[in-house]
Structure formats: C-alpha cells, structure tokens
Image: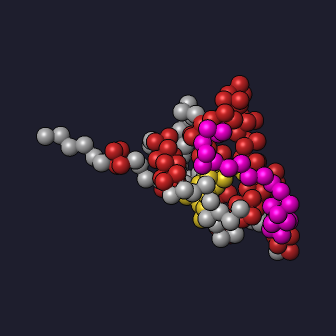
Amino acid sequence: MVIFDSNILLFLLSSTNAPLADPRTQKPVDKVPERIEHLVQELIKRREKIGIPTPVLAEILVCSGTAGPAYIQKLRNYSVLKILPFDEKSAIEMAEMTKQAKDLGDKKGGSQEPWQKVKLDRQIVAIAKSANAQCIYSNDATLARFACAHDIQTITASELPLPPKDAQNCFEF
C-alpha cells in the first residue's frame, strides 16, 4: 500500500491544476500529470493499492467547488484506489505521536506550521502507519519530515520517473 497526499491526488483527478513546485528547489516540476499517471499504471501492474486518507479526500473536496461529484466518480473508477478512514487504530497512532511530541516539550514536534496543519499531517501519517503503507507520495515538505520521523518514506512529484516515451530525448538528424 502507498498513500497519495492531496497535492498528488489532485493531478490524478484534474489536468487544470497550478504548477507543482519541487519542495527542495522551489522550481516547477514538468509533466506532473504524466508522471502521476505513469506511477498509477506501474502500481496497477504491481497490484499495489493506493490509499487515500479521508483527511486528504476532505481537503480535495473543500477545494473542488462544483467538480466534487466528478472527482468522487473518478475515484470510484480506479479499482486500485482505497479510501482509508481515520479510525480507532489511526486515532491511537496519532495520540501516541502527539504524546511523544508533548513529552519532548513541543506538541508541534518542531514544526513551524499552524497547529491545525500539524494535526492534519499527523492524521495522514497515522492513517498511513495503521494501513502499513510503505510510502507517501507528496510534495509537502512538512508532511515529508513528519512521515520520515515515523519511518515512512516520502516521494515527491519531481522524483517520479517520466513515462518511457517522455523519458527518451529526441535527436534531430
């Protein structure tokens, strides 16, 4: 199981998104929709499930406007996608994460983000942990640091390979 964060999921649902910046360089990532579609096809070949945490789904729907119902329908069309709830197991994981941070004297765990964002990121990581996810696909540097602190790899859009036809350079003769 892998997890998609909202900034990655949006490119699977819509081709009219603002450019996505590499969190390390702040430069725009080229061909993001193609990279994500290629990733999905590779995950399908490997019979790997893509988890969508309910907080990610909520974030997408809040920003979707009238496209919300179409997004839900598109999600239902991908058999590889699984909506993951913030359930009892996830709540226990998140409580432990928050308790550890408080015991170290900083409930935000060193983050400079607003408390609401910290809680949202913790929910996503707690859901990922409770689903035994290997990695989270996200361009959110704060979420990536938090996931890493809990032994979950994060992969950004710029780290995704281009589809084979796009990966080859054209040579003029």
Residue for point 65% across, 70% down: 151
Report x, y in % for residue 106: 82, 67
Residue 172 appears in the rendering: yes
Q: Is residue 173 above or below residue 164?
A: above
> In this rendering, does residue 146 appear at all?
no
Q: Nearer the viewer, residue 103 or 86?
A: 86
How far across and how far down the image is residue 148, in percent?
64, 67
Instruction: Name the quarter where the C terminus is drawn.
Output: top left
- Asked whether, in this view, residue 154 is left or right of residue 150, the answer is left
Left or right of residue 24, residue 127 in this image:
right
Q: Quadrant of residue 129?
A: bottom right
Highlighted magenta segment, given as a residue range: 75-98
Residue 80 lies in the magenta-colored region? yes
Q: Is residue 76 magenta?
A: yes
Quadrant for the N terminus, please: bottom right
> Residue 137 location, x and y as percent?
59, 54
In this picture, residue 119 sits left or right of residue 8: right
Q: Outermost residue toward the top?
A: 66
